[in-house]
Image: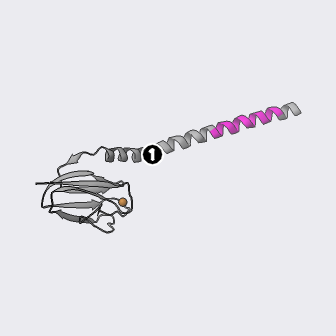
Amino acid sequence: MSKKLVVAAIGIAILVGVVIAVFALKNNSSNDMTNMPTAKSQSTTGATQTATTNAVTIKDFAFSPAKITVKVGTKVTWTNQDSTPHTVTADSGSGPDSGTMNQGQTYSFTYDTVGSFPYHCNFHSNMTGTVEVTQ
Ligand SMILES: [Cu+2]
């Protein structure tokens, strides 16, 4: 009788172990899946490619392209494609100050001065961009 009990206990222990292992594996893989897009979008943000455009898309918590070059006097337009509200806010001085932009909203700012103008989102400090204004 006690031998049977020990066998049963070992059997249960193994079962519990397997269930825990399967759970851990499942959790790991689902974490990887959910983390991947975030990691991807962050790396694209990190790779600051300067684009010659006057249109910036706000998507997946990032400005895209994060860095653009425009000629002085160009009107730059941002479009929020996220369901989350964002802002386009100059880091300092006079510059874009969109206030809250909801999904689908656009905001435009005309750069009349040559220079490099970094901006950010007021709600998400990791969201940054730069407009390079050339002659
Ligand atoms: Cu934001």
How many numbered discs sit on the rendered protein?
A: 1
Residue at x 46%, y 43% (from the top left corner):
33
Q: Quadrant of the C terminus?
A: bottom left
Main SS, magenta residues: helix
Q: Position of residue 64 (x, y in %)?
A: 28, 52
The residue lying furthest to the right in this view is 1
- 81 over 100 or under it: above or below: above
Membership of 13 in magenta stretch? yes
Say what secondary structure mark 1 lies in.
helix
Which quadrant of the figure shows ligand 1?
bottom left
Colouring mode (rainbow / by chain / secondary structure / one colour) = one colour
Of residues 84 and 63, the one drawn nearer to the viewer in this rendering: 63
The image quarter containing residue 3 is top right
Instruction: Depth check: give the residue in front, 3 or 99.
Output: 99
Residue lying at the far left in this picture: please name it: 135
Under mark 1, the amino acid is Asn
The residue that appears at 19% across and 60% down in the rendered structure is: 76
Q: In the displayed structure, does residue 45 sit left or right of residue 16? A: left
Is 77 a magenta residue?
A: no
Toward the bottom, the furthest residue is: 99
Residue at point 71%, 34% (across, down):
14
Q: Which residue is mark 1?
A: 35
Identity of the residue furthest to the front in this view:
93
- Residue 15 image position (x, y, % from top left): 70, 37
- In the image, which residues are magenta? 6-20
Residue 115 pos. (x, y %): 18, 55
